[in-house]
Amino acid sequence: MSGHKSSYYLTTPIYYVNDVPHIGHAYTTLACDALARFMRLDGLDVRFLTGTDDHGQKVEKSAQAAGVDPQAFTDKVSENFRSLWSDLGITNDDFIRTTEARHVRACQALWSKLVDADEIYLGSYAGWYAVRDEAFYGENELTETPDGKKVAPSGAEAEWVEEPSYFFRLSDWQDKLLAFYEANPDFIAPASRRNEVISFVKGGLRDLSVSRTTFKWGVPVPGDPDHIMYVWLDALTNYATAVGFPDTDSAEFSKFWPADLHMVGKDIVRFHAVYWPAFLMAADVAPPTRVFAHGWLLNRGEKMSKSVGNVLRAQDLVEKYGLDQVRYYLLREVPFGNDGYISHETMVGRINSDLANDFGNLAQRVLSMIGKNCGGEVPAPGDFTAADTALLNAAQGLLPRLRADYREQAFHRALEATWGVVGDANRYVDDQAPWALRKSDPPRMATVLYVVAEVIRHLAILAQPVMPGSIDRMLDQLGVAPDARSFAALETPLAAGTRLPPPEGVFPRYVEPDQDGG
Ligand code: MSP
């Protein structure tokens, strides 16, 4: 797309290793995976990063509770995330852990730059801290429970902390951040999150405590190892570490930084959209291009989390419904950016209507007709009618629309547009009734089947980012060579005469287990 650079660097949050991975974590990573695949198919040089946030008081406490040292604990739990991503077909190019040497070096270098710029000073912190959020809170942000506990808006309990601490001069950054948001209207999306961040910053910023002394599990502050860095300063730096920071002159860093997108859940937008650009600008490093904060997946009306006890495991859903089905459902069902309820009923609805009936049957019936009536070869079309051209144009018009939707992380809109053309194609087949042309007008039947096959090729190529496995099989059946599946290949139409393997359905219907075999 003109105006964009040829590389695309996107990141997931790095996940805390105190938690077992669940569908909420998978949601963020799946969305990024679809985006990464889309950008690769569109010819961009993609760097897709995920990883784990190994440090902090929360993780240290979990390790203590498990009776193991934090390094051994994080080695084990980090692996759960790595294997989940492999089960879900995630195509991350790198997996970072904050305990790695490359990262400790990057954090210490960033710290030193901040010190050199006089952005950090030693003081002492007396205030509230919520370990579950790893966040400092002002008194005014907390509510008190009947038994006198202080609770953050997230529901996490806050405790009073008093300790020596280094501070980052965040209060100096209020105007500069507001000017930055103003100059970069796409920096935070969706708009609701942007407004929330702007009003938070307008409300005034206090200097931020960026070191802790009462526990050990973190990156030591250069020159003062009694202090470890605040876990969010450490964690955010991962995005720069992974492309070579502090070697800002390296080819890698110049190519991929600033990051094109940090994808996050709305719970952590403040860290990404306020603290992170302030740290970077203070260190004279360019801030990222965009932060998109999606909503929460809710189960039984609440954000899924281990502490609430309502988590769904991605692997269980995949086993029950199929990987591509889960990927499609999550990106299609909930407008990306909103909170969303997930349920068995809506999942089955999507699988059976959108996938099995609408797209699966379209491919299956057209490919079977080609198999039976055209000798198993892509038929040669004659002249196109207005109806043929209208359908082909609709399919060819999808790529520019999808580019805009993916650039805005509007996955649901991209899928809705794609399935709009699936609907057009089904109506076309019904109207043209190729089965009735078999005897009356075989050349016209050949044209109709060719047109639908060519439209299915478009739809399939464009649906690859969301359902890579199933679509690979569909493209095999359409005789599309593996090296002819990029978006650039859309421009080369199906070649008449290509031999096709016998068709088989790629999107099975979901059948309730108790009806199975009945
Ligand atoms: N370690 C920090 C992030 C540091 S990034 C520099 C953290 N980790 S986390 O394990 O708590 O994961 C947070 C992310 O997981 C959320 O921002 C969100 O992307 C995802 N989700 C966790 N639960 C979720 C839902 N129930 N629904 C949707 N996304 C959820 O915060």
Image (cartoon, rainbow, N blue to C red):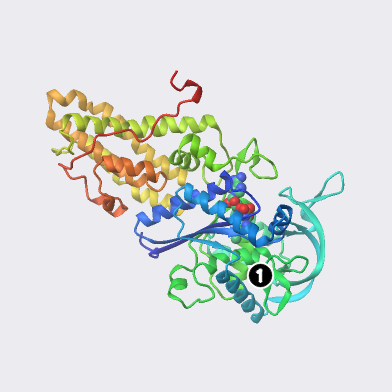
Image point 50% across, 41% down: which residue?
330
**Which image quadrant is residue 506 in?**
top left
Report the quarter where the C terminus lies: top left
Image point 87% across, 48% down: which residue?
148
- Type of residue at label 1? Val
Compare residues 442 and 70 and report the one nearer the observer.
70
Q: Position of residue 422 (x, y in %)?
A: 34, 36
Check mark 1 vs ligand 1: CB closer than 8 Å? yes or no: no
Image point 37% across, 32% down: which residue?
358
Q: Position of residue 229 (x, y in %)?
A: 68, 69
Q: Position of residue 166 (x, y in %)?
A: 74, 73
Image point 26% across, 51% down: which residue?
484
> Looking at the image, how many numbered discs can be counted on the residues?
1
**Above or below, comparing residue 181 to residue 447 in the picture:** below
Secondary structure of the residue carrying tag 1 is loop
Mark 1 burial class by Cα count in 10 Å: few <14, some 14-19, many 20+: many
- The residue at the far right in this view is 147
Compare residues 247 and 260 and report the one nearer the observer.
247
Residue tagged 1? 219
**Above or below, comparing residue 443 to residue 69 in the picture:** above
**Above or below, comparing residue 247 to residue 444 in the picture:** below
The answer to whether residue 195 of the structure is visible from this angle is: no
